[in-house]
Amino acid sequence: MNETEITANLRKIKSSLPERTRLIAVSKTKPVEMLQEAYDAGQRLFGENKAQEMRDKYEVLPKDIEWHLIGHLQTNKVKYIASFVRMIHSIDSLTLLQTVEKEGKKHDRTIDCLLQFHIATEETKFGLNLDEARALLESEEYKSMNHVRLCGVMGMATNTSDMGLVRSEFATLRGIFETIKKDYFADSDAFCELSMGMSHDYPIAVEEGATLVRVGSSIFGARNYVNA
């Protein structure tokens, strides 16, 4: 895709989003030249699903980019991104959050994170359920953390053409967000993010309250699976 197409795609998507919803350009597997084109068109939020790929791109691209780690994150990979990542969307265990805390402390910074919930029918997707999230939030380990800040929730809907199912899953995630907000973060303005929706379903996610949508192929074209 050339620059004109990427710019036009960004403009079209952004014009369809309400003021409360921000666009994360999902750039996984895409070359830095494509990211630079999106940057030149005004895009600043980029999402990657592999820590080392994000680190490599961070090193060569403008430093005012907000990097969002949106894929499953292994504890031994947190160190690659802890010094610069803007937000980690995929916290699915206390162990992972403890690792982010440890790496945040090393770099003397607080790392924003989202709790990832399993809302899809596919067993292959990662994420917490509400009981597991409550156990995490009520643990002494979490309460003692000073270098992570939970800012909301993330989830991925079932990969299906049944948009009714997708909508119900997004509504479920919104309900989880509202429950956790009320029970644990009622006094926290920072706990405000609902990250859901991708290229094929983000309009429904927006209707269901998404504050962050993660869109890749609708901006950059079909995903390149080479070395993915």
Image (cartoon, rainbow, N blue to C red):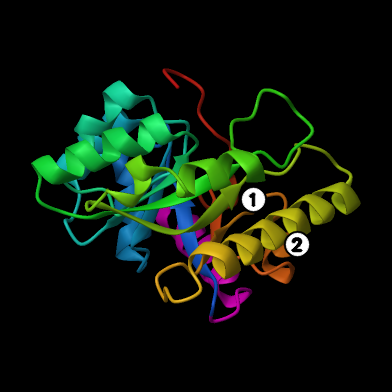
Q: Position of residue 174 (x, y in %)?
A: 68, 62
Residues in magenta?
1-19
Residue 178 x %, y %: 64, 66
Q: 107 or 65, which lies in front?
A: 107
Residue 221 seen by the camera? no
Count of labels in the image:
2
Residue linked to disc 1: 199
**Distance from Cα at disc 1 to Cα at disc 2:** 11 Å
Of discs 1 and 2, which sits in the foreground? 2
Residue at 67%, 57% in the rendered image: 176
Q: Amino acid at mark 2?
A: Ile
As drawn, 196 above or below 127: below
Q: Is residue 63 visible?
A: yes
Q: Is residue 80 above or below residue 62?
A: above
Q: State the image coordinates of residue 100 (x, y, percent, origin top left).
A: 28, 39
- What residue does disc 2 label? 204
Give the SS element for disc 1.
Answer: loop
Q: Residue furthest top?
A: 227
